[in-house]
Image (tube, rainbow, N blue to C red):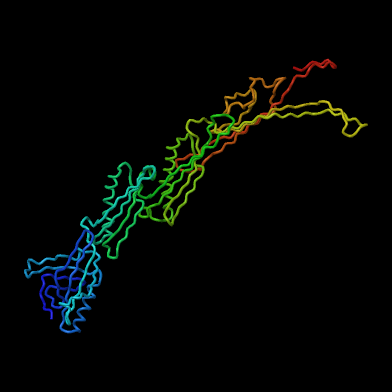
Amino acid sequence: MVHSIPSPFEITYGGLSVGGTSESYQLHGPYAYDKSFNAIRLVFDVVVVATSFETLQTLSEALEAAYSARDGSLTINVDDGDTDASWTMIANTSILNPSASVSKSARPEVDRGLSRVYTVTVEGESPSDDGGLRDLEVTVQLDPSRKKTVTFRGTYATSGARAAYSSNRDAEDPGILAGIDSTFAWELIDESHTADRNDVICNFSRSYVQLIMDQSSGTVNDTSIRDHRVTFAEHIPSPGDAKEDISRFRNVTGTYDCSLDVDVVTPANGAMKAIYESKILGLLVEAFNANFEPQVFAIEDQQVAYDETHHRVSAQIQFIYQKDGGDDIISLIESLAYREQRSLAKTPVYTQDEYAMNVDPGWAVRQRIATRTVMVLGSVPPRRRIGPGADPAAEPGGEITGLESDGEKVLQGAGWNMVSNASQATPKWMGIAGVDDVEQVEVTVLDETVIEEWHTLPKASSGYGGTPRP
């Protein structure tokens, strides 16, 4: 029979104590104890002693149940009989996610009919003394433009690990980011964390990106806007005009895409639209002006998408503009054509076939037709006269190519004389009305046509004695 030997060590796990003054559960030999920064492991032998087989079975089953469970409370108390010398070697808060296992040992010297030896192992994780932070890894990634993305990965090991993560990271991350690069502001764009069943281990990941452009009008880091992207694409049409150095309208597509923080912008009808109109539209207009420095501009098309499911705003704005330094002419197309019509004097010969006739030249008309379409900035009236006699410098577009002014002489006996003149001015406004701080652009389209005829002086007639008319 195994005799009861009191032990100064009492181990308690899952509400069952062994050692100490217990006669039923006696510690056999020393225990093994390992502790590291991450883990704790305790191994000891227990001798179960009973006075009957029925009691031995009951005691054994109780030990197996208590020391094969998880999340039990573990303490080791030391008491040598002096109350002042008693202390708790391991408190329950010193081990996280504890679990225990028990195995039946084969010890012939103590494993008798009414005694049984078990080897018990209790292990778990160690809490961190650094505010609960056990591990932290900081990764800095640079894209081809050298823009930085910083990712934090780590583990909190403490009671209430999720709360420790939430409160500590918001306070500690900015200092680390400033040490990496204090030139730009930083924005949290991706975050995830996982807590275990007891909320004592929390693994997390956070990614920050540098903000190299304002998120809203006049604000680099707008708390309501997350992960924004701004792009501009310019289309410059080939002039194809009748003269060089014409400054045509150019097209620029400005695109903005972002997420809205649901903790700042409450999902509600009209909330996303209000953010676009008050913050995003103004930023796009400011950025367009800064990049392209237009002489005049307008918004020609505007498309905005509100993704209510993912709380995102996507906008695309079509700008038209004339570059700074251009004159008032936006486009100029000119053409010059000659047209000749003649009549024939026909004398048929009736005694021959039906196509036989004598043909002599009759009257002929030669015309020169000049056309021009010019678009100019502002309001311009049509011109009363475009052909010879007009002042080409007095109206936008100047003189039509191919027409030569002959001072104030309106009609000349020999040469080109104007027979038709048409000038039509069509005003139009370009751009969307009602956009804040963006005006429409007024332009005028001038369609002009001049028709001239070629005239020669007749020769003196010998048959009738006539003289040519001056």
The image quadrant where one finds the C terminus is top right
Q: Position of residue 55 (x, y in %)?
A: 18, 82
- Residue appearing at x 7%, y 70% in the figure: 81
Say whether residue 174 is visible.
Answer: yes
Q: Position of residue 168 (x, y in %)?
A: 26, 54
Instruction: Place residue 284 in its image quadrant.
Output: top left
- Residue appearing at x 22%, y 78% in the figure: 61
Q: Position of residue 122 (x, y in %)?
A: 22, 68
Q: Is residue 233 left or right of residue 76?
A: right
Q: Position of residue 370 (x, y in %)?
A: 65, 29
- Looking at the picture, does residue 147 appear above or below residue 36? above
Of residues 429 and 337, the one drawn nearer to the viewer in this rendering: 337
- Looking at the picture, does residue 233 appear above or below residue 358? below
Instruction: Place residue 104 in its image quadrant.
Output: bottom left
- Residue appearing at x 26%, y 51% in the figure: 171
- Looking at the picture, does residue 105 appear above or below residue 266? below
Of residues 35 and 93, the one drawn nearer to the viewer in this rendering: 35
Say whether residue 210 is visible.
Answer: no
The image quadrant where one finds the N terminus is bottom left
